[in-house]
Image: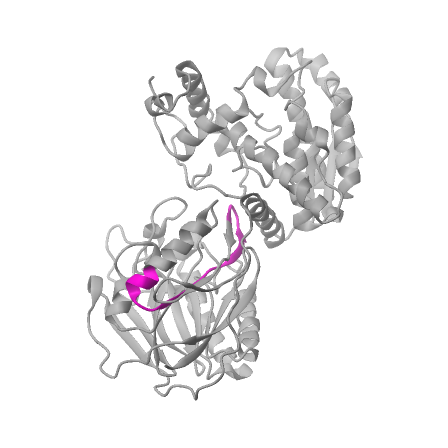
Amino acid sequence: MPQLRLALNQIDSSVGDLAQNAESIVRWTRHSAEQGAHLVAFPEMALTGYPVEDLALRSSFVEASRAALRSLAVRLADEGFGELPVIVGYLDRCATAQPKYGQPAGAPQNAGAVLYGGEVVLNFAKHHLPNYGVFDEFRYFVPGDSMPVLRVHGVDVALAICEDLWQDGGRVPAARSAQAGLLVSINASPYERNKDDTRLELVRKRAQEAGCTTAYLAMIGGQDELVFDGDSIVVDKDGEVVARAPQFAEGCIVLDLDLPAASEDAPTGVVDDGLRIDRVVLSEKPLAPYEPELTGGYADRLDDDEEVYSALVVGLRAYVAKNGFKSVLIGLSGGIDSSLVAAIACDAVGAQNVYGVSMPSKYSSDHSKDDAAEMARRTGLNYRTVAIEPMFDAYMGALGLTGLAEENLQSRLRGTLLMAISNQEGHIVLAPGNKSELAVGYSTLYGDSVGAYGPIKDVYKTSIFRLAEWRNRAARERGQTPPIPENSITKPPSAELRPGQVDTDSLPDYPVLDAILDLYVDQDRGADEIVAAGFDRELVTKTLRMVDTAEYKRRQYPPGTKISAKGFGKDRRLPITNGWRESV
């Protein structure tokens, strides 16, 4: 059987930074060549970054992407890699699509290309366009209608892009019809909890359907609320795993494959789903037999809590770095949420770049102030105390506020103080709100909701405790000091805006609340279904009403790392002005 050494480059790209992304592709191609690769691949839209959103509708950006691709082909040849085929994802446009109502202007396409000999020798566009969750690809792209097949060293390699594997039909059965020996899919599939298991089963299934070895190459890094976890996978035609890349780590997996020879009478014309085979022959003759040396390896899987925590770290790190910031600012209350955010921030950007501020009021307990200071001592982050009581007294003297207005004033003074320090010193503020609080509106607009990014925005409160415990346990296992004070984990959660206040004064116990929220928010279950699942009718009614009336608050919350199948933002789009209520 012919042999082929495949290099899958699991890299991070920045949306819009064409020059830097091209530089990264050249650098990793050089690395692949040094490993003796015969075919090199990069993720979906690696040249432009993903997702480009409405940039796809700007003809200037589309043309810049196309020009950058051509320049990259020349650059690779000039660097001595002209005889090494390189698969790259980029933004293109369809030259043949006729303008019509409902089609994006300019007919942009989520595309891939093969660069060889200083030229673009093959290009193709994503056939299946996702339009669910965070994806709006019907808004941005027109679909491809070809079945691209690259013949290299006597092997026919079929090519696909992300959703082409996630949906039935299309390029997977077409790869079988085209008699491909290898299917390479380039992807920018965002991370979600437990998606690695779903992804593995998907790739196994598609390999068996395609009847050939299948390589699933994924992106890593972060873009706004999305985080990409890598976890590239190669399986053989029977669905057995051949290689698997690490999660949340940039790198290149290189492996030697024994693949069936291309058929002399390989099909041409139109195959499954009306796809037209577009075959380009680079080299008919198989390589001289060699002793396989590289297996690609199989990276250990992260456990569930480490996986989520890693996603939160990668997401925050990417947001800070890609937006040109160097440091972050956190209001440290001594509570579990701000403590976990501080731990994530220290791991993401380094404790020397994390600035914590304790802002006690007359209601702040001594243990909370002590816990905040202890968190700073354990991690080494920069720490200061600025009491808000003088400012609070001035406002109260002028306005004479009472009740909820008095409580919220404290939070808003803290928000104003954080933003003032941010403006003065150049740090970006991190908002400490979690998904449970955001769901029911248990936060103060322009108070604890201020910030540029919310690292735990998509994490329920019960998971906050679990992640904090995991982070401390991981530190102990490494012989390090656990970053989060035990008291911050074990004490009852409280906003400390009035004497003796605890969260359960206003909310159900978090395990019960989060279970209801999971059904209503994440699974879109109605009230009757939630009650039927065993929850108290009155409690369900109250909880759902809080969720429904807090939509206006969520719209004003900063972006934050998405780790669930349905985060607040693009995943879940409900009207603010909404007369519908679930009846029970």
Q: Nearer the viewer, residue 337 or 306?
A: 306
* Residue 307 drawn at (x, y percent): 55, 48
The quarter of the picture where residue 445 lies is top right
Kindly tell me whether residue 426 is visible in this rendering. Answer: no
The quarter of the picture where residue 108 lies is bottom left
Q: Nearer the viewer, residue 420 or 472?
A: 472
**Is 504 placed left or right of 568 in the picture?**
right
User: Which residue is painted at 36% across and 32% down in the image?
Assistant: 524
The quarter of the picture where residue 377 lies is top right
Is 216 magenta? The answer is yes
Q: Nearer the viewer, residue 201 or 151?
A: 201
* Residue 438 drawn at (x, y percent): 52, 30
* Residue 33 drawn at (x, y percent): 53, 79
| Quadrant of the image containing the C terminus | top left
Q: In the rendered image of this protein, does residue 358 appear above or below residue 280?
A: above
Total marks shown come to: 0
Q: Which residues are magenta?
A: 206-226
Is 12 magenta? The answer is no
**Is 375 placed left or right of 98 in the picture?**
right
User: Which residue is painted at 70% across and 47% down in the image?
Assistant: 477
User: Which residue is painted at 40% across and 63% down in the image?
Assistant: 240
Kindly tell me whether residue 330 is visible in this rendering. Answer: yes
* Residue 352 drawn at (x, y percent): 76, 48
User: Which residue is painted at 42% across and 35% down in the image?
Assistant: 522
| Quadrant of the image containing the N terminus | bottom left
Q: Nearer the viewer, residue 375 or 116?
A: 375
**Is 460 placed left or right of 161 in the picture?**
right
